[in-house]
Structures are given as C-alpha cells and as structure tokens.
Amino acid sequence: MRNLFFFLFAFILSSPLQAQRNCGTVQYLNDKKQQDPGIEARMQLMNKQIQQITSTKDGKTSRNVIRIPVVVHVVHKLQVQNISDAQIQSQIDVLNEDYRRLNADASLVPPPYAPLAGDTEIEFCLASRDPNGQATNGITRTLTTANTFSINDAVKRSSTGGKDAWPTNKYLNIWVCNLTNPLLGFATLPGTVNADLDGVVIAYKYFGRTGVVEAPYNRGRTATHEVGHWLNLLHIWGDDEGSADPCAGTDQVTDTPNQEDENFGCPTFPQESCGNDGDMSMNYMDYVNDACMYMFSNGQGDRMRATLENFRSGILTSSGCLPALAPSDCDTLNNITGGDGLVYYFMNEILPEESGYLTGNNSLGYRAFAEKYSSTEQQIINSLRFDFAVASSQSANSLATAVVWDASGPNGSPGVVLAENTFQLDDVIANVESFSFTDVYFPNPPTVEGDYYVGFVLSTTVGDTLTIYCNQIDKVNTNTAWCRTSQGDWLAFSDPESIGEAISLSVSPVQCIPVSINQVVANTVKVYPNPAESFVTVVGGSSSKYWQMFSVDGRMVDSGNSGHVQEFQISTASLPSGVYLLKLQESGATSVIRILVSHP
Ligand SMILES: [Zn+2]
C-alpha cells in the first residue's frame, strides 16, 4: 500500500516535460551487440582482466593524475543549440569537480557510504592541441540540417549531418546536439564500437550548468554519468531488468551495494533493496536528478583507472592537453638524420658550386617556381626553407606566398594547393643580407605522400623582385624544378619551351620537432635493439633519466622517468611502426636517439 501510494504520488509530481532520466547507453550497446555478437565475450574477458588488475593492485598507492583531453563537437541546427563556450567550459569544470571529489555537494553522501566515496584522480581538459599539433580551443561547431539525433551514429559522422571524430584513442570526443526527448545522452563502452564511433553524446539542454541547461538535469551530471560509461562503468543496479532474479545483476564493482532497480527523482536515504543498507542512489551511475547524485565509489574509480591504463592507454600519451606546437618550437634536426631525407631535406649538396639563380617576375614573366619531391610514406610539412639570393620590395607590405602543391596537374605538374602562407619580401631582404635562410611556416601543416611540390608564388607588383638559388644538374636530369608562366601553365625547366635545362631550386620541405631536441647526442648511452619491436633497453649514463618519445612530426607519444638504475626498458608495443626520436635527459646531458619501431 505504501508503495502504491508512493508510486501515485511520484506520478502526480512528474509532469510529462520533466521526464525521468533516460540514458541510451544500454540500448545503444544492445543494438551494437546485435550487429557484432562477439561484443559480449570481449566485455566478459575485459571484466575478468580488470578484476585481476584491481584486486592485485592497491589502488591508493603511486597513482598519478590522469588527464583526458576532450574535444566537444557542437552540432546544431537552431541557434539555441549552438551552446556557448561558457556552457561548455562549465561542463569541463563539473567533470573535474566530480571526478576529483571536489564537488560542493560531496558532503551530502550519507554516513554509511561516506568512506566509500572516492577521488578517481582523473581530470579533463578542453583540448589545447589538435590532432595536427595546432592550437585549438577544443570545440568544433557544425551546422546541421538534422532536426534531432537519436540512439545511433548519425551525429558522429559528417556524412550523416554530424561531425567526424578526432582520433578517439587520443581524445574523448563529446558530441552535443539536439537529442529526441526524453533522451539525455549515451556513450560507448570500451571495445564495443569501431574507433571512429567511440565517445559520448549529450543533449545540449543537459550539458554543463550554465547557459540553456534545463532542470532537473542542469548541473552537468549527465556528462559525469555518460563519461563514467565511456570509462567502463555500468549502471549501479546492474542492468538486470527482465531477469527472474531482480538482484542478479552486477555493475562489476565490489564496493557498490547490490541494488534492485534504478532510482528516479530525489529519493530519501535509505531506500533498501536486495538486502542492502540502502541503495547508493546518490551515485553518479544511478538515475536520480542532477542535484541528488554526488559520488563515485573507490571501486568505481579503480575500474575507470584500470580501464584507462589498459584499454584506453592512448589517452595516457595524448598530447591533447599540451600547448600547440609553435614555429619557434621547431628545429630542423640536420645533425641527427644524416641526410637520409626523412626529416630534413635541405639540398646542400648542390651548393655552392655551380649555383646560379633565377629572377622572379622577370622578362620571361614567370609567376611561380616549384621543386618536386617524393615521399614513400605520409609526412607532415611544417614549413618550407628557402635560400633566396636577391630580393627587393616596392613597399613594406610586399608579399610572396609559400606553397605546397600536389602533383595532380597535367603531366604530373603542380596541381591542387595543399597549403600556403604569405611572407614579407622585407624579411627576405634582411635574411639575404645576413646570409640566412627564409623559413615559412604553415598554420595548418599539410600531409603529403607520393609526389608533391614546394615553392613560391611571386608578387606581380613592379619593383618586387625575388630570386632563389638554383643548381644545374645537367648530368642527372631529374626534372625537379618547374615554373609557371604568365599564362598559368606549368613547365619543367628542362622543357625546351622554358630554359631547356634540368635545374633544382634551393627550397626544402621541413618537418619540425620541439626545440631543444636538437641537442648533443651523448655517446655514453646505448639503446637496443634498434629496430625495436615491443621494447627498447636503455643502458649507460650517470643518473636517473627523464625520457620522452617523439614521433617524427614532433608529437610526444610517451614519456617517463627511469629512476636510479643503469638499465631500463621502454615499451614500444603500442606505438605504430615507424621512426621515433627518443630524448633522454639526465643531469648535464641530453641525448636524442633515432629509433625504428617495426612490428611484424
Ligand atoms: Zn547510463
């Protein structure tokens, strides 16, 4: 009778607009399981492994705070759905408070469960570095024609009116959009979807705690709950709806009490079920209102951290929370690569003997010059290095443009512009006077593979002159230098219509890595095996070492501290095959060692 009365009372209080919390994660998971019957077995195996990890490890010792870079994709049709930066930041603030147990309502946890409430030591940042190493505010905004999104993947793909994910092994992707009522959000559990679909979806009205948020889900707890799923937490009642024994389900966490069903609204503690001392309804993984959930348990924290360290470990080495690479962070590594052409391409072998120069905007009317390169693998070009011979400018604003083209033009000539940036002729004049190169950086570095061209487009202003050193390589006709006539046609210099001789231009594509990498290469440290498969061993040196592993495009992919040992190992098992730079810092010495990681 009491139950019936409570039910009626609750029903009367709930207006149709104030729907009960509705998380779509389980339905989304069940849909995926229908398409991929292997999911269930993989989840069971993962649960077993996490149980082993968390039971053999004291979760309280030697825990570093894990920071998760977040990118928020705002997908909107109406202006109201295009939520403010402030609303987004408020959600990041809530996540950081809730996951670090710094939430103002943490003290409301009832005494029996207060000792179980934990600091997960997981933090979040809005990404400051995008997948290309460039500066970002961690927010993308996409105008869509879709009125609403639902429990499927439409919002996660540009081709279906949404926005493509950033690399999901390096960023937590959160899509914010208009979801069909009464859905608040849904998430992907680890290992249950293809990588490009991994992440969290939240309705714009329930994201953050300022702006256009609506009660009773106006305190940012929907994202706290859904990110919990993304970190492998299950609903606290064990999702056992429909099973014969309503207490059979488990959330795979030992310190959360067994619980029969979800709780809605704002229940008074204790609501007992399954023989517990009261449901832990104030847990973020129940279904209560935002104002009535305020804790993760220690066991939930252990499960999330074990998941991050073992099944989402790419996050641990993500550079998404680091400042963007700036041009001043770049160096050309000419001491390290030894002319193998991987990182640094300067053609010093053609200078200075037999060098000459070409005059820009001259009587021949050339409009642009390009030098052909080829790469057998994908490479990012951060800048171009020119060796200009002479320059003059008509005004202080005189500009030329550095360009990277693909080779899709007629006869393999320069085609589509992949990147461009202007530079000032006055800067070139100063560089020429001091015998310096002119470096031009690209705000959005292009990725090249196969044939491509680098070069520059001239100013057509009378009085602006730009010439670049070149070299005649008559004996080896590589046809690498091209020019564009005033009619817009590209000609190889070897073409009789042009100069009729094979020539190379002194312009080089440059990849950059953070400054200070290009340091003394200490020969007291040895690293083997190289090429490496799953690990390298570092031997030698005098003291403990701080080490960082960089990819060739300058992103730090891993780092650590050796401690006071003469020999230690660094895992390369999770690194994709390719070339890396291992930077070792110890007192008074810095070493940089090239490592080839090669997985069979
Ligand atoms: Zn949920």
Image: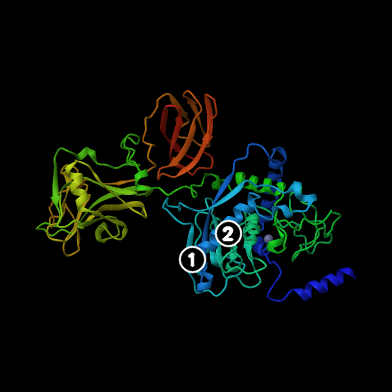
Residue at horizontal 53%, vertical 70%?
81
Corner quadrant of residue 211: bottom right
Q: Residues within 10 Å of mark 2 (few under 14, many from 20)?
A: many
Q: Is mark 2 within 8 Å of ligand 1?
A: no
Which of 292 and 410 lies nearest the eye of the viewer? 292
Question: Mark 1 CB in 8 Å range of ligand 1?
Answer: no
In the image, is residue 546 above or below residue 177?
Answer: above
Coordinates of residue 172 in the picture (x, y in percent): 55, 54
Relative to residue 308, is residue 292 drawn left or right?
Answer: right
Q: Quadrant of residue 578?
A: top left
Q: Residue at x 31, y 49 (%)?
A: 383
Of the four image quadrants, the one with ligand 1 is bottom right
Q: Looking at the picture, how far across and down is residue 510, in whole percent?
A: 32, 45
Q: Is residue 95 left or right of residue 501?
A: right
Residue at horizontal 67%, vertical 64%?
Answer: 23
In the rendering, at what x and y percent does residue 322 appear? 47, 47
**Residue type at the position of mark 1:** Ser
Q: Is 116 in front, or is 236?
A: 116
For disc 1, the marked residue is 158
Q: Is residue 509 left or right of residue 319?
A: left
Q: Nearer the viewer, residue 461 or 359?
A: 461
SS label for mark 1: helix
Tell me the number on the disc at residue 365.
Answer: none
Quick one: SS at disc 2? helix
Q: Which sits earlier in the primary sequence, circle 2 or circle 1? A: 2
Quarter of the image with the N terminus is bottom right
Amino acid carrying mark 2 in the image = Gln
**Where is mark 2, residue-wise?**
91
Q: Residues within 10 Å of mark 1 (few under 14, many from 20)?
A: some
